[in-house]
Amino acid sequence: MLHPLRSHIESVSQLTDEEFEFVLSHFTPVKLKKHSALVREGDMVKHEYFVMKGCLRSYMTDADTGKEYTYQFAVEHWWISEREAFVKQIPAATTIECMEDCELLALSYDNRLKLGRELWKYEHYLSTKSALGYVALQKRLQLLLKGSTKERFENFVQQYPHLYNRIPKSIIATYLGVSRETISRLYRK
Amino acid sequence: MLHPLRSHIESVSQLTDEEFEFVLSHFTPVKLKKHSALVREGDMVKHEYFVMKGCLRSYMTDADTGKEYTYQFAVEHWWISEREAFVKQIPAATTIECMEDCELLALSYDNRLKLGRELWKYEHYLSTKSALGYVALQKRLQLLLKGSTKERFENFVQQYPHLYNRIPKSIIATYLGVSRETISRLYRK
């Protein structure tokens, strides 16, 4: 079976076995237990992570109200990091937490640049996936701006059926920007 | 004076004069009058545009309510396109309209790929700018999820002081997802 990271890259650029071995040699495996933090608010973020197994979320807690806001989920074969901190090399503004036991592949900032420089296909993979990530985020923003609570929920269920059954509904509520009561009502329907 | 497109690329990768001439030879100048549409809903989108002069916005009209939602503004030295339609080569879901007379540089989808393939620095510029664009969009989403109307408005004014004085406040309201009455009240303060 193809390595999941290879499948992910090959959705953009085909690689030879040698090229993929070269790519993989820049990654380091990381194992984390459920409830542990991959990134804490204030940390310098030196890596981005490809998820081999498990489920994570990034969130921020409002200092005044104590309310949590979930910004991103990640499961198998998704990338996650505190993107702003990683890209700009500034301290993290959000926390990334393991919601299950996790196995990740870590790529350092320097190795990311090196891979892109030494293997054009990797740079092209980055630019293509970033563009698609931007589009996905734009659709989420459109839904947040325009959609009703019900539409946001239905869209989430339709887009991510595997997350809907895996993640506690109280946390999905903090992702959709709706109250816990509202989400319970929507789940019952 | 450095060409604005060259400055933009050189914020990521330094170019020689020859390299910039090569890049620029892939662009086509476009002039459009105020109120004209650069992209209409349903169009196939074959280009992305670098703004030399003028101001544009992309928006969608809700079929049921007739309400408008503004997704993006662009002024001098920003890129604009119907990103999803351009990246995935599917029909446009939003309209892009000139709010002033505009001068643009158009880059076709094929030339974008060609430039990235033939000049690594251009591919690296794309991947870096896409990553930064993603981060900027993420911050907007965070503010939409978490910020009060007042915070969203203040953040907009602080982040884009030049847009705040240039764009009608009724349109800024459709970008921030607040009512026209609310925005008038905030402007008075």
Image (cartoon, coloured by chain):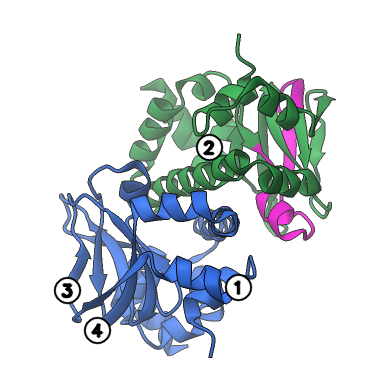
Chain colours: A green, B blue
Instruction: Respond whether the residues carrying marks 3 and 2 are from the same subunit.
Output: no
Q: In front of the other: label 4 or label 1?
A: 1
**What separation in Å lies between label 1 and label 2 (alpha carbons)?**
51 Å
Give, as a three-letter code, the residue at label 2. Ala
Horizontal arrangement in the rendering, residue B101 relative to residue B78 (left or right) = left
Look at the image and say whether residue A53 sits in the magenta stretch: no
**What separation in Å lies between label 4 and label 1 (alpha carbons)?**
32 Å
What span is colored magenta in the figure? A80-104
- What element does badge 3 sit on? loop
- The residue at which mark 3 appears reads as B36
- What element does badge 4 sit on? loop
Q: Residues within 10 Å of mark 3 (few under 14, many from 20)?
A: some
Residue B140 vs residue A104, the one in the foreground:
A104
Residue B136 in picture, x, y percent from top left: 56, 61
Question: Residue A173 got which mark?
Answer: 2
**What separation in Å lies between label 3 and label 4 (alpha carbons)?**
9 Å
- The residue at which mark 4 appears reads as B101
Residue drawn 43% across the image and 47% down it: A135
Instruction: Respond whether the residues carrying marks 3 and 4 are from the same subunit.
Output: yes
Q: Earlier in the sequence, mark 1 or mark 3?
A: 1
Residue B65 vs residue A82, the one in the foreground:
A82
Question: Residue B16 got which mark?
Answer: 1
Instruction: Respond whether the residues carrying marks 4 and 1 are from the same subunit.
Output: yes
Tell me if label 3 and label 2 are in contact, CB under 8 Å. no
Q: Earlier in the sequence, mark 3 or mark 4?
A: 3
Give, as a three-letter code, the residue at label 4. Asp
